[in-house]
Image: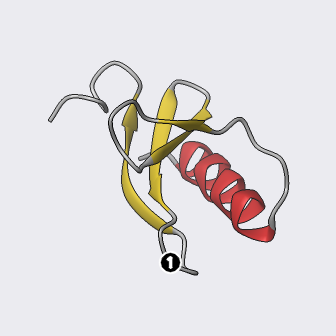
């Protein structure tokens, strides 16, 4: 992954972990959440006090299992 993409993703995840407002949506039929970062999507599990990044990838393929 390119350094600029990686830093943008890390910045959004850090902002979410601090409690800042981010564009956050719940995935249908799941307890997971998603944060868009450009053309990438970050899938997050926040069931505990930890923020766990489950997967990161392009928006077209990130939702496919």
Q: Nearer the viewer, residue 29 or 53?
A: 29
Please identify the residue farthest to the bottom as the structure is shown.
49
Tag 1 residue? 48
Q: Is residue 16 above or below residue 26?
A: below
Q: For the point 77% across and 59% down, which residue is it? A: 15
Please identify the residue farthest to the right as the structure is shown.
20
Q: Quadrant of residue 64?
A: top left
Q: Nearer the viewer, residue 12 or 31?
A: 31
Q: Is residue 61 above or below residue 30?
A: above
Q: Is residue 8 above or below residue 52?
A: above
Q: Nearer the viewer, residue 46 or 6?
A: 46
Please identify the residue farthest to the left as the structure is shown.
65
Q: For the point 27% across and 25% down, which residue is it? A: 61
Image mark count: 1
Q: For the point 54% across and 79% down, which residue is it? A: 50
Name the spot of residue 42 as percent of width and height, x first. Answer: 48, 45
Left or right placement of residue 65 versus residue 57 in this view: left
Name the spot of residue 9 as percent of width and height, x first. Answer: 59, 50
């Amino acid at each position: 992954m390119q350094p600029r993409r990686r830093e943008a993703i890390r910045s959004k995840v850090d902002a979410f972990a601090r409690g800042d407002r981010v564009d956050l949506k719940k995935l249908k039929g799941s307890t997971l959440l998603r944060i868009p970062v450009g053309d990438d999507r970050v899938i997050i599990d926040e069931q505990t006090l930890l923020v766990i990044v489950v997967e990161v990838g392009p928006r077209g393929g990130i939702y496919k299992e």
